[in-house]
């Protein structure tokens, strides 16, 4: 593969699918300017298929016309060595399918406020496409036709992006582009889409409501049959509140109105759905709170992505393979990477850890465990002793018990973070709960990770070493 594609320098292959492969690339300019983009290229053996090429060009034509904060932008359609490719906005984040899988593995629910924010922004993005007017002033509604969890992304900075208008249709007044085959994703198509009827924008509203129902309940709505095909089944259509009592009645009713099988009774527009969500939602997360959740759930993937974005033009590989080791391997442990323990280095100094726990027996056990793994541990049973230890020597890492009588670990972390000499020092919490809310709070006060009780010596050591390696990597990258 050439290291360039048109005017773009290819840095990394991100993924490969049945029809196209996706690359991370960059376009360079004067004065050290560099812009990262995603390149989507039809697979070489499909470049001769006229129908697929036509669809690919149609995707480029439609997507490039769209300009909305919640829609991933397409910059241009290009051709290199006879192969068509799209240059698109690079979205650093996770799709809703991965978000749902991760929270399911952890046994926790996606916060309702987060779900409502994502669905509102996605509905507004679809409304923009549904009411699109081209540069000539002609009304040209665009129906996405494949609204699924995989095609809605949440960025690490807390933004929402609708992606992949690959099978979208632009319908001009007076001469609609009719669909001759059923295209869409099993389990998310509207009843009229499954029947092969002519579609309007309400089909996307139904699909988005399916996604919302699943995020709120944590379960698939329409399950596949023996053929592996999941069509809408009225018998399975139950209010989300019946499966999750934490959902407000008004929000549950909003979802059901958007899921009406009779499209004349369905919420008609993305704008109406967005407004209904805002009215019914108990709260709506902002970008900062959403970013905090992403940091809690995908801390290691975020670090890995940042590292991969710094790769050279000579780097090769597959981003999904590189990130696979950062998938949560245990429902209680989202931050443990699937990596082996770091090999012992001859004459290497023992990393210094400050451990704070009001229980003398627990503190002694933690010291024995960490010292058996090659760490030098200073124990403190009170905040005063902890700050005295900090005054005598700066530790490489700090471990705080969350529940203590005089001051909880979160407040102690907050106070420690006010010290300039602890900037960059990893702070890890010990907790028996490790709920998503607790993890978010820990992140907000300056913590880096959680270790769930009960734990093993190797688990604690691996977690601490992982953070020390991250700090060393960041320090190396910022050192001239």
Image: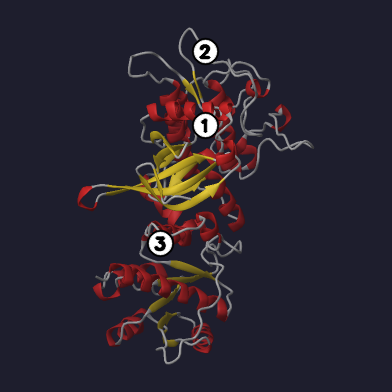
| Residue 136 can be seen, yes or no | yes
Determine the CA span between mark 1 and mark 2.
Answer: 17 Å
Earlier-in-chain disc, 3 versus 2: 2
Disc 2 marks which residue?
176
Disc 1 marks which residue?
166
Above or below for 116 versus 125: below
Above or below for 452 versus 271: below
**Total label count?**
3
Earlier-in-chain disc, 3 versus 1: 1
For the residues labelled 3 and 1, say whether their Cβ atoms are less than 8 Å apart: no
Give residue 41's position: percent from left, percent from top: 49, 40
Give residue 421's position: percent from left, percent from top: 26, 76
Secondary structure found at label 3: helix
For the residues labelled 3 and 2, say whether their Cβ atoms are less than 8 Å apart: no
Disc 3 marks which residue?
307
**Residue at 37%, 59% in the rendered image:** 310
Secondary structure found at label 1: loop
Give residue 196's position: percent from left, percent from top: 66, 19
């Amino acid at each position: 593969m050439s290291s360039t594609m048109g005017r773009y320098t290819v840095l990394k292959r991100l993924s490969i699918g049945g029809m196209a492969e996706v690359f991370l690339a960059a376009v360079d300019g004067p004065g050290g300017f560099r812009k990262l983009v995603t390149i989507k290229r039809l697979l070489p053996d499909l470049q001769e298929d006229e129908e697929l090429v036509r669809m690919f060009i149609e995707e480029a034509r439609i997507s490039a016309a769209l300009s909305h904060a919640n829609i991933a932008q397409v910059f241009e359609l290009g051709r290199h060595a006879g192969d068509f490719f799209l240059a698109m906005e690079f979205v650093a984040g996770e799709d809703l399918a991965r978000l749902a899988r991760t929270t399911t593995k952890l046994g926790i629910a996606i916060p309702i406020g987060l779900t409502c924010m994502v669905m509102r922004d996605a509905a507004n993005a679809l409304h923009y496409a549904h009411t699109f007017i081209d540069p000539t002033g002609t009304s040209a509604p665009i129906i996405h036709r494949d609204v699924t969890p995989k095609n809605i992304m949440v960025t690490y900075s807390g933004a929402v992006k609708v992606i992949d208008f690959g099978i979208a249709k632009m319908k001009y007044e007076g001469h609609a582009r009719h669909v001759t085959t059923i295209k869409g994703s099993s389990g998310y198509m509207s009843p009229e889409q499954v029947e092969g009827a002519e579609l309007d924008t309400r089909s996307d509203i139904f699909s988005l409501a399916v996604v919302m129902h699943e995020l709120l309940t944590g379960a698939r709505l329409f399950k596949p049959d023996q053929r592996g095909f999941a069509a809408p089944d009225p018998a399975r259509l139950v209010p989300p509140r019946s499966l999750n009592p934490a959902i407000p009645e008004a929000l549950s009713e909003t979802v059901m109105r958007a899921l009406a099988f009779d499209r004349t009774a369905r919420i008609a527009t993305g704008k109406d759905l967005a407004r209904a969500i805002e009215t019914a939602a108990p709260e709506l997360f902002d970008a900062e709170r959403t970013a905090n959740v992403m940091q809690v759930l995908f801390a290691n993937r975020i670090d890995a992505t940042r590292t991969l974005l710094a790769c050279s033009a000579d780097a090769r590989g597959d981003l999904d393979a590189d990130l696979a080791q950062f998938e949560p391997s245990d429902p209680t442990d989202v931050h443990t990477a699937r990596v082996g323990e770091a090999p012992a280095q001859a004459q290497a100094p023992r990393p210094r850890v400050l451990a704070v726990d009001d229980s003398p027996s627990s503190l002694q056990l933690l010291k024995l465990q960490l010292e058996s793994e090659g760490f030098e541990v200073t124990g403190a049973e009170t905040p005063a002793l902890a700050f005295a230890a900090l005054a005598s020597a700066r530790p490489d890492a700090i471990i705080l018990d969350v529940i203590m009588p005089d001051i909880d670990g979160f407040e102690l972390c907050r106070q420690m973070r006010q010290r300039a000499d602890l900037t960059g020092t990893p702070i890890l919490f010990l907790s028996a709960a490790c709920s998503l809310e607790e993890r978010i709070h820990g992140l907000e006060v300056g913590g880096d990770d959680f270790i769930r009780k009960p734990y093993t010596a190797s688990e604690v050591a691996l977690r601490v070493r992982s953070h020390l390696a991250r700090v060393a990597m960041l320090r190396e990258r910022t050192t001239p």
